[in-house]
Amino acid sequence: MGGRGPKRELAEKIAGEITLSDDPGATLRKWRTDFDISQTDLAAELDVSSSVISDYESGRRESPGIGVVGRLVEGLLTIDERRGGDRIRQYGRVLSAGFDSDVVLDLREYASSVRLSELYTDVDATEVASGGTDRISGHTVIDSIEAITRLSSEEFFRLYGQSTNRVLVFTGVTRGEATAVALRVLNPTPNAVILHGIDEDDLWPHAADLARIDGYSLAVTTTPLEDLLDELVGLE
């Protein structure tokens, strides 16, 4: 894994998190599942039995040293590369936009625009306010709490990537009030916003009104996050 770049930086991030974690096994499991790699596939890549990976993740085996962590991380990245490198590219896109991966979970531009209604159908989202466009050209998935508490207004603009003609997906939403208010300071606003984690009944009553005033489509969804990310990736 010589040289800098997304792969090297991602390797260092994963290895650092596992090594410094109070529960290295749980952190390893988090990254393995994020890469959608089974214990069996990781074990095969490292030429060990599946029970070895299971023992590390459950804490039955002594916490792995730096050398073992390096092999585990290399295995994850090698499998991802063989599958097309989607997770490495995703991390690279977030890095290139200048964000930490715990703030921006994914940022993509589409090869061609897609119908907003198609995206809503794919992620099982319910539109609660219509906007001024029926097509979008990209998406950004954001941890709502991290974004609101850590990003400046200038950094919020960078969430747009190459264009405001995109959907901003805010995860970890409980009512949508803070997100709606934060979006009021942006000019221009994005063309569409999805609030993830709530349904229409739980939405702050004024959120739809603010969306209509500012001219963006607003939708909500309770689709599991990993499923939502997978569906969005399929739009590329």
Image (cartoon, rainbow, N blue to C red):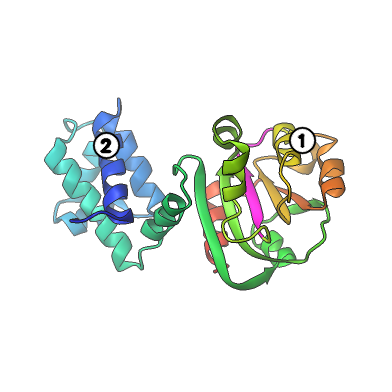
Describe residue 130's horizontal placement relative to residue 162 as left or right: right
Is 33 located above or below residue 87 in the figure?
Answer: above
Give the position of the C terminus as an image quadrant: bottom right
Start and end of the magenta stretch?
166-174
Which is more N-terminal, label 2 or label 1?
2
Asked whether 171 falls inside the magenta stretch, the response is yes
* Type of amino acid at the residue the image marks with label 1: Asp
Asked whether 135 falls inside the magenta stretch, the response is no
Describe residue 157's horizontal placement relative to residue 181 as left or right: left
Question: Is there any visible trace of residue 224 in the rendered image?
Answer: no
Mark 1 sits on what residue?
Answer: 202
Q: Nearer the viewer, residue 96 or 178?
A: 96
Q: Residue at x 22, y 38 (%)?
A: 55
Camera-nearest label, 1 or 2: 2
Mark 2 is surrounded, within 10 Å at the Cα level, by few (under 14), some (14 to 19) or many (20 or more) other residues, namely some
Describe residue 134's horizontal placement relative to residue 16 as left or right: right
* Type of amino acid at the residue the image marks with label 2: Gly
Is 136 located above or below residue 15 in the figure?
Answer: below
Q: Which mark is residue 16?
A: 2
Image position, residue 193 (x, y; %): 70, 50
Element under disc 2: helix
